[in-house]
Structures are given as structure tokens and as C-alpha cells.
Amino acid sequence: MNRNNQTNRAADRLLKMPGKLDRGPINFESRISKQEGEIMAIASREVVSVTPTTTIMGAVGTMTKCGFRRLPITDAGTHKLRGIVTAGDIIDLMGGGSKYNLVQVKHNGNLLAAINESVREIMTKDVVTIRDEARIADAINIIVNKKVGGIPIITIDNALAGIVTEKDVMKVLSMERRSLTVKNIMNTALKVTSPDTPIGIATRQMLLYRFRRLPVVKDNVLFGVITNSDIMRYLGSGQAFQKIVTGDIAEVMSLPVRTILSGELYTTTPDANINDAAREMLDKSIGALPVIEDSRLIGLVTEFDLVKAFSKE
């Protein structure tokens, strides 16, 4: 069966069932204007954005304060979308990716100087977007096929109308009970790092393997999961600058990853139902769960894995 048809059918079933957004029964005719599609019923409408002239540090500060992984960049007057900056862009800047040239080449390794440049220097300009008249199935197709974690929603004149994320879609799809377990969908080809690995090396590993997160393991013991958001918060919270004497980025990135790991560690088991795993992620506001069996890490299940699984027939 065609994947688009599978996704459409999954979304259609949910929309026909009352109360599927966990907000009471939904009457789409009354809740959504005739110019809007289903997508606006699950999207965040009050979207925080910054202008292209905002400094990189200003953008990071906004993302850290609000707990965002991504931040749309819009014109001040028209609110038209000009780009987006993500936690991945920030670790690219700090970890030796293509955006690292701003630090190393333009500012001779001086991170303090680089982060005072405008955010337009590192933002993604060719943004994957979706129209405000779109269906939920359209968002699912983009997330699954393009592996995009958050999609800005725009009007016909390119003004920012909202944003929809993997978490928003997972919340809707997970309302329908499925028989799959975590072991059916988890990623077992894991890359891990150790608690004493310098942040700079862990960041380069994440960029190399195109991962948003790395389990932190030593002597077969799971210490936690380091994410690109953790590294971004390290910069945005000011911790990084307490380590700087010369302004050289090497000073900032030499701290071991164990010092910036998030607090509590939440895990799941291979036999857990995927609906229960999704509920755990939603309740704890986390994007992934390490999978533990016999006290050993055997896999990782993410929001993307769950959206993909729920969207299949």
C-alpha cells in the first residue's frame, strides 16, 4: 500500500473519533476557520520568533528560556518567515560543522565574538514549511519522509501562523491504541559516548552521525543521554562563559559531558507498548527513551520512531 494512503487513513481515523486531541470533543467546523486546515487544530499558534538582526546569543537565550529546540526567524513588521535556527545549528556552530567557519575563520576561534553576530549568519533559509490549510496527514508525511522535527506553518503570503512538531503529531496519533512494542521500532545501532568525553568531542560525534542525542555509558552503566538541546543550554545559560578566559572556543568545549547531563533519567523496556512509551515522553517532556533490558542499554526509541510507527497501517 502507498505510504501516503496509509498516513491519510491513520489521520482520517483519528479525526473521526471524538476527543482525540485530549481536549474534549472537537468540532472542526466551529474550531477552524474555512481558510484553515486540520493542522491548525494541533499546532502551536502563539509562536515565539526573533528577527534576522537578533544576535546568535540572543536567539540561544530565547530558546533556552522558553525550552525550544527551534526558533523561527521573521521580519519585525510583516511577520514573514525568513528562516529558522535550531539546537542542531547551534551545535554545528560550536562543534566543527559548516557553521563553525563563523567562529574559526571569521573570528579566529573566538566564540564570544562569533555569537554576537546576527542570527542570519547561521539560520537555515531554505525552510521546510507547511500551509495553514494543510491536513495532519501532510505534516506526518513531512516528518516521516524528510525527518524534520518541527515545521513552521505559513499563510498564503508567507506569514508565520504557527508551528507543528513531532510531539504534537505523536500526541494525536498515540490516542489510538496499537499492539506494537518498543522492541519493534527501537533503534539498536547506537553510538554512545562516555561521561568524561569533552563536550567538543561529543558535539562532533553528534554532527558526524547526524544524531540529536547520544547515550552516555561507562562500564555498561547508562549515566544519561546528552542532547543537542543540553549543549545549547550550556551556552545559553551562561555556564560556558564561566569557563572562558581568552574567549577561545576550546576552553568552552573542554568540559566533560557529565557536567551538563539533564537531571533525572527516564527509561523504558523492550516489551513496553508504544502507546505507553509515547505517554511517558509526553508526560516527562522528553524526546527519547533509552531501552533497558537486564540492566543493559539495548536501544533507543524517539519521538520520530513513534510517529513513524503510529502512522503506518
Image: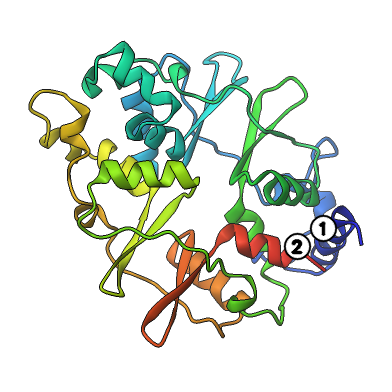
Question: Which residue is at 37% across, 25% downward?
Answer: 100
Classify 242 as above or below 109.
below
Which numbered disc, 1 or 2, marks the residue that appears first in the sequence? 1
Q: Which mark is residue 50?
A: none
Is residue 245 among what the camera can see? yes
Q: CA distance from mark 1 to mark 2?
A: 5 Å
**Residue 308 placement, left or right of 13:** left
Quadrant in the picture for residue 93: top left
Q: Which residue is mark 1?
A: 7
Q: For the view shown, which residue lies furthest in the bottom direction?
A: 294
Residue 286 location in percent, x, y?
45, 61
Q: Circle 1: is it few (<14), some (14-19), or many (20+) Cα within 10 Å?
A: many
Classify 144 as above or below 183.
above
Circle 1/circle 2 CB separation < 8 Å:
yes
Q: Circle 2: is it few (<14), some (14-19), or many (20+) Cα within 10 Å?
A: many
* Helix, strand or loop at mark 2: helix
The residue type indicated by label 2 comes to Ser
The residue type indicated by label 1 comes to Thr
Classify 187 as above or below 251.
below
Question: Which residue is at 79% across, 46% downward?
Answer: 138
Question: Which residue is at 24% across, 15% downward?
Answer: 108
* Helix, strand or loop at mark 1: helix
Please give the count of numbered marks on the rendered protein: 2
**Residue 209 placement, left or right of 167:** left
Quadrant in the picture for residue 96: top left
Q: Which mark is residue 311?
A: 2
Residue 101 location in percent, x, y?
37, 19
**Residue 289 placement, left or right of 251:** right
**Residue 73 placement, left or right of 128:** left
Residue 259 location in percent, x, y?
19, 54
